[in-house]
Amino acid sequence: MPTYDLTTPISEETIRKLRVNDIVYITGTIFTARDEAHERALEWSKENKALPIDPSGLCVFHCGPIVRETESGWEVVAAGPTTSTRMEMFEDKFIEAFGVRVIIGKGGMGPKTALAMKQFGAVYGAFTGGAAVLAAKAIRRIVSAEWLDLGMPEALWIMEVEKFGPLIISIDSIGENLFEQISTIVEKNRERIYKLAGI
């Protein structure tokens, strides 16, 4: 499997080269956004209000990090991925409106998001669930904490990361979807096993 070290902002041309099963590490700026942050960002976009960050070419991480405030600023304790399907109702519009290039989370996303990735040049990078401390180790610093009125997990955390990953490209920009591929294999095996068992 090819491995890529990418630095944000990431171009559409670079994203279009990635394929399902590729391994990616990210260096540069990423930001977290869950349901409420997605909703607010899209509302602000409709009102022509500038976001606290320019998302173009960046990575959005579906994550509600555990952070603590220290004398030198915010520190990430753990940063495990949130189940991405929670953001399916927003993500296609988010990709179109803001030009994000990599969606990071766990569990995959639905057909609307996959279509937007194909149309606008984005990919889904799956991060291993349960590896929250590994993720935190790749976060060099929190640049800023925005929209804290939404609560710590839902806030917009802007982070500098170094070799954040590994991310497995699970939905690419040409329409391939690792989750669908695995589902097809599982279904074929299930039918074969049922036949062998006489069910």
Image: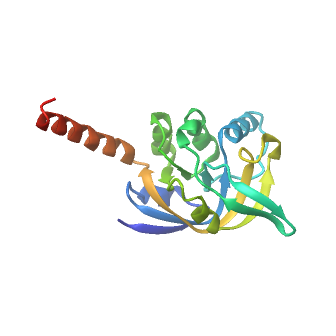
Q: Count of labels shown?
A: 0
Q: Residue at x 55, y 52 (%)?
A: 104
Q: Residue at x 57, y 37 (%)?
A: 86
Of residues 180 and 172, the one nearer the viewer is: 180
Q: Residue at x 78, y 41 (%)?
A: 150
Of residues 142 and 113, the one nearer the viewer is: 142
Q: Residue at x 64, y 53 (%)?
A: 56
From the viewer's perspective, tell me whether residue 43 is left or right of residue 84: right
Task: Specify the farthest residue to the top.
Answer: 199
Q: Quadrant of residue 39?
A: top right
x then y, percent, for residue 80: 60, 54
From the viewer's perspective, tell me whether residue 70 is left or right of residue 186: right
x then y, percent, for residue 77: 69, 61
From the viewer's perspective, tell me whether residue 34 is left or right of residue 48: left
x then y, percent, for residue 136: 64, 63
Task: State which quarter of the image contains the N terminus.
Answer: bottom left
Task: State which quarter of the image contains the C terminus.
Answer: top left
Task: Specify the farthest residue to the right.
Answer: 71
x then y, percent, for residue 35: 66, 38
Image height check: is 88 above or below 123?
above
Taking the image as drawn, is residue 175 in sight? no
Image height check: is 100 above or below 42?
below
